[in-house]
Amino acid sequence: MSAVAPPPPAPAPAGAPAPARRSARDSSASWRWSDRLGLAFAWTLGLLFLAVTAAIVLYMMVQGIRYVRPVLFVTHPAQGVSEADSGGFLDPLLGTVIVAAMAMAIAFPLGLAIGVWLSEFGNPGWLARLTESTIEMLAGSPSIVFALFGTLLFEQGALAFLSRTNDGVVYGRSFFAAAAMLSLIALPLMVTNVREGLQAIPGHVREASYAVGKTRIATVRRVLLPAARPSVVTGAMLGVGRVIGDTAIIVILLGATLRFNGAGDVPLLSTLKGTGSTLTTFVYQNAPTGEINQPEKAFAAGFVLLSMVLALNFAVDVAARRGRRWR
Amino acid sequence: MSHTEIPTPPPVRRLPLTGAEPRVVVDAPAFVSAPRRKLDGTPLAIDRMHVDRLSIAYGSKLAVKEVSLPIRQGEVLALIGPSGCGKTTLLRSLNRLTELTKTASMKGRILLDDEDIATLEPTALRRRVTMVFQQPNPFPMSVFDNVAYVLREQASRRPRKAALQGAVRSALERAGLYDEVAADLSHPALRLSGGQQQRLCIARALAANPEVLLLDEPCSALDPQSTQVIEELIVALREQVAVVIVTHNLQQAYRIADRVAFMYLGELVESGPAEQVFGSPREARTREYVSGGFG
């Protein structure tokens, strides 16, 4: 959208060297002073943001590499008063992985289905519009709101089987509760990306499939979703990024306990019904302002978390680059 | 599964190929530069479809007004006319693709082998009346799978590849593409050249073994060489299927069409043998259009 006409060549300031023979579009030296000021402003801001981002990432990386030790990955966290006796972050790391997997197990199929429905069916129209504004609302809500709603929901007796109960009191804190609410954070990213990926496919490709006697469903499954795969993958990975970065829901709905604290006797189910933590709450508690206050651990865990998010972003870039084949 | 059944539509009445050689027509009107590739004499033609007083409206805007037209196997029917005259709408109504537009409404009848197409299942109709589009649009899969997709039932992955080899090959051969892609049928279809992609789309449309083949400006995105290959293909195909082509290119219509229908503002102004419509049009509007007066 560069519909802006090239500015008329400004009269050369007195005493300035003769302007080089280039078109006005090529050289900003011939621009009006206000345009040149704007350009300088844009560059300054751009570089500033770049510098801030680079500083954060570099600082975290340097600090993280200083403190991260292989042994931290395989050691349970422990109550301790010094960096040496407070253990590692095995439980939070596993917690991050479990929470991401569970949340995406809900958000991926649901987001895919909603995205496909919005793009390919969207009938009746009022329901589609309602769905779209709901998705936008979910995308705009702070996660702590979901967390609060989650406590209310999972403390209901009917959902007691999903968390620890004690004398009829339902705790409402478990991996199930946290993952269910976290999936709401990933859902809008999933829906938006799936829908946009499908809408980027030209209409005549759909019609080509209908024109050989295929139904809408067959077209979606065999033609459109394979074509939109990069967008689907992008949506899923952005969703995972949001899920593993969330703190509020973990603190409120997962309990943010130092270690896994199972409920019940069934081996795996007891962990999922119990409480735990993720890297985000581990960093929060180990930060100088947190209750454990072991900054070296916080830096090490933050480094791991940041690496995971950067790896996801890189994967998104790769996935997005392998798309758009009709343009 | 011990035996696999290939779902193919019921057999279609086929015309025997005539042995006539292509003949160059020398007395072409001045505005036509390329020679005609036409068979000698009037080809034997059978009615396959009949459009009967068809009107189509988008909302309140009438796009096609009271059109009646036969569509015959053994002939290439070209729909010509200026942009927005309703020729593509008419074409799309023949396999009920117009129904995908929510605002479209239709009056009149279209018969396919004496059956009203409104009574047919759209998916069944669209296998008998297939379509090729303006932009080559292979699906993002291999050359083989593009054709096999049409042969398989809806979203099914069966029959397996081995059972479909013969049918896929024959469709590619009919579209004149087999020799070029035979070496690697697993090649991604989107990496073929534009002309090859369009012939793959034709192969796809032929794989369903249709009675009528609809072509919506199939050469407008292609270079002259690919256009020539596809034009020759279309002329050859009319023996097996009824061919309807929408084209903006009058020279193309003159080169390949046996019958020409000229549409203007949704009305069918004139239709008849190509020689007559181009050589001695009855209507003044047709005369102006074919001599480049407007549109």
Image (tube, coloured by chain):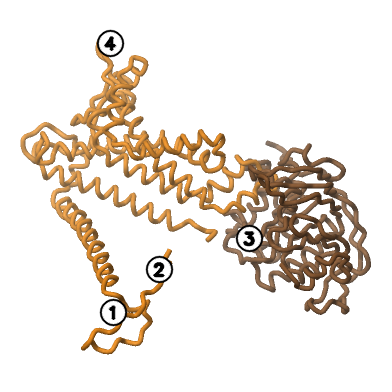
Image location of residue A228, percent across then percent down: 50, 49
Q: Is residue B6 visible?
A: no
Question: Does B171 sit left or right of A321 as displayed?
Answer: right
Give the alpha-carbon distance from disc 2 to disc 4, as whole Å. 69 Å
Image point (87%, 49%), residue name: B13
Q: What shade has chain A been given?
A: orange
Q: Which residue is disc 2 drawn over?
A: A4
Nearest the eye: B275 or B226: B275
- The disc placed on residue B135 is 3
| Residue mark closest to the camera, 4 vs 3 | 3
Residue type marked 3: Gln
Chain B, which colour? Answer: brown
Kindly report the distance in space between the C-alpha atoms of the residues bearing marks 4 and 3: 66 Å
- Please say if the residues under marks 4 and 1 sit with CB atoms less than 8 Å apart: no
Q: How many marks?
A: 4
**Residues indicated by labels 4 and 3 sit on the same polypeptide chain:** no
Amino acid of disc 4: Gly
| Place of residue A165 in the rendered image (x, y in percent of width and height, measured from the top left) | 27, 15
Q: In this figure, which residue is indicated by the disc labeled 1?
A: A29
Q: Judge the density around disc 2: few (<14), some (14-19), many (≥20) Cα neighbours within 10 Å.
A: few
First in residue order: circle 4 vs circle 1: 1
Q: CA distance from mark 1 to mark 3?
A: 44 Å
- State the separation of the CA atoms marked 4 and 1: 77 Å
* Secondary structure under the numbered disc 4 in the rendered image: loop
Label 1, secondary structure: give it. Answer: helix
Q: Amino acid at mark 2?
A: Val
Q: Which residue is mark 4?
A: A168
Chain under numbered label 4: A
The residue depicted at 23 percent of the width and 47 percent of the height is A304
Say the numbered circle drawn on residue B136: none
